[in-house]
């Protein structure tokens, strides 16, 4: 889970730093950054919203009997000050950064359109 959190937060942070508008398709469940089940991605995004690390989404729980969690998008997507702090100072994010390595940075740079 930490790897996916790192990828989402880092993408949003690099977009902010480079003046790029984040695009949901760049960091969603089936994107160049990750391929995971949609429900798992929604749980991760819900956690990031509840912690105050990202904005641009709304959580709707128990909307129907079949869906316990529903994430509604409300662009613009962005990382918050708290999210930047977590990304840059948390030891788990440092380990995720090391795990992702240069391959992730190359993909991220191509999405952002800037060398990171």
Image (spheres, rainbow, N blue to C red):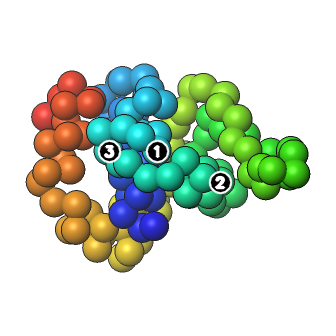
Q: Which residue is mark 3?
A: 33
Dot 1 or dot 2: first in sequence order is 1
Q: Secondary structure at mark 3?
A: loop
Labels 1 & 3 near each other (Cβ < 8 A): no
Q: Nearer the viewer, mark 1 or mark 2?
A: 1
Give the residue at x 14% y 51%: 103
| Cα–Cα span, label 3 and label 2 | 18 Å
Residue 109 in picture, x, y percent from top left: 19, 36
Who is closer to the viewer here, 54 or 73? 73
In the foreground, 4 or 19? 4
Q: Position of residue 97 (x, y in %)?
A: 26, 63
Q: Residue furthest bottom?
A: 91
Determine the image quadrant of residue 12.
top left
Asked if residue 92 shows in the view, the reply is yes
x 55%, y 47%: residue: 38
Pointer 2: what residue? Answer: 46
């Amino acid at each position: 889970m930490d790897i996916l959190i790192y990828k989402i937060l880092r993408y949003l942070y690099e977009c902010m730093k480079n003046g790029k508008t984040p695009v949901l398709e760049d960091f969603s469940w089936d994107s160049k950054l990750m391929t995971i089940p949609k429900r798992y991605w929604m749980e991760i995004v819900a956690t990031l919203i509840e912690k105050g690390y990202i904005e641009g989404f709304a959580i709707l729980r128990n909307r129907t009997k079949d869906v316990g969690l529903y994430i509604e998008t409300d662009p613009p997507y962005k990382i918050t000050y708290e999210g930047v702090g977590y990304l840059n100072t948390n030891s788990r994010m440092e380990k995720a950064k090391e795990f992702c390595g240069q391959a992730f940075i190359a993909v991220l740079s191509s999405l952002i359109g800037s060398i990171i």
